[in-house]
Amino acid sequence: MKKMLSLAAMFAALSYAAPASAALNIGGDASIRARNESYYGEVTPNSGRSDLKWQYRVRLNGAADLGDGFFFKTMITDENNAGGGWQTVGYGNLEKYTLNVSNFYFGRMQKDCHYLAGRIPLGAFNNPIFDLTLFPTQPLENPVANIVYDRAYGINYGMKIGPGDANATLVMLDNNSTKNSGLEGDGSFNDGYAMLLSYKFNLGDVTVEPEYLRILTNSDVLAQAPTSISSIGALPMYGQVTPYTLGANVTVPAGKIKLGFSGMYTHCDDVTSAAYPSATVLATAGFPVPAATHVNYNGYEFRIKGEVGNFMAFYDYNHTTDKSTSLAAEAKYNNHFVWAQYKIPVHQSAAGSITIQPTLRYLASSAIGGNGASTALNEQRLRTELWATVTF
């Protein structure tokens, strides 16, 4: 609490100290929620478990207009848990909520182009391309937004080309390679870099955004894992690989309904000197796994989303096939996810708002094959939540 008050005081001091030509805006949101979490499944350590959790989150946003199109933005929240800034009430209320700089970036917005740099937001909640690339065997329930906090160190440049907007984003996924080898190349330029290219344009009332994401240099892809195994909610699955993902997002208005569709395909075919067993399937099955030399998998994800008034829902489906040489047999992953919410306004004014939001999340995951197990994972999880949020 002391740290939160100190950060709020710092923002206030900066706003008073800013020169008259600069505009510093401070805002954010604070939420509390009750979450009931229930598990079902044939082969899972969580089968039959149910838990009611009381959680909270604070996010502070700062934005400065520096004039002539130059700007600075930042968001501050807690990043000490694998939940997108949410903290769960613990024993004796002794848990700590430590505010950190989650993202910050500065740049310039002009009429026909823009550029920015820093710890930039990825927009992963509404765009699954990073989810499928970094979590290829279980990309559902927004792991990049929840586990990676929807940001990465990088630069972005965008400009108008023809009838649409083109964007190029270069991000650093890791910064830990120092080796020089035939497989890895020069360690000075072999950290985990990724490039996202996109082009957004309109066809009448329909918005189309094709995109392509490539991990340019060796990096890890991850597997979601319970926080009892990994404090960050993920473990390395395969290391030093360079997969690519391509697809498109499409938005279609239909009267009062706004429909969204996404389709993504990912593929990896790499010889690597580092491979890790799958945290979700092989470790659950209990089989030892030798280090792989050939990582070979492909997968796809489809999303359909609908919004009408204060109601929003989307459905995700993912299938991934893994033929890597670390597996005794081909592994096939199938995942389904549903998110549905209804936002009830309680208060609205120029200063802020208060809303109540019932939310439902349903995740079903299965994996067949892999390292000799006929069914290594078959789990369903239902989360029912009630949020109360104040924005300011």
Image (spheres, rainbow, N blue to C red):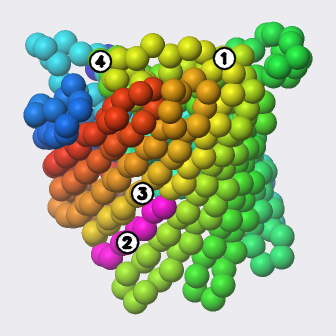
The residue type indicated by label 3 comes to Tyr
Instruction: Give the label on residue 317, or none.
Output: 3
Task: Quickly name the residue at label 1.
Answer: 274
- Residue 283, image x and y in percent? 39, 20
- Residue 68, image x and y in percent? 78, 54
Task: Quickly name the residue at label 2.
Answer: 306
The alpha-carbon separation of the residues under discs 2 and 1 comes to 41 Å
The alpha-carbon separation of the residues under discs 4 and 2 comes to 34 Å
Instruction: Give the label on residue 228, or none.
Output: 4
Q: Earlier in the sequence, mark 3 or mark 1?
A: 1
Q: What element carries label 4?
A: loop
* Badge 4 vs badge 2, beta-carbon distance below 8 Å: no
Observer-nearest of 209 and 139:
139
Residue at x 24%, y 16% (from the top left corner)? 95
The residue type indicated by label 2 comes to Gly
* Badge 4 vs badge 3, beta-carbon distance below 8 Å: no
Residue at x 48%, y 38% (from the top left corner)? 331
Q: Is mark 2 on a helix, strand or loop?
A: strand
Mark 2 or 1: the one toward you: 1
**Above/below status of 108 relative to 58:** below
Q: Is mark 3 on a helix, strand or loop?
A: strand
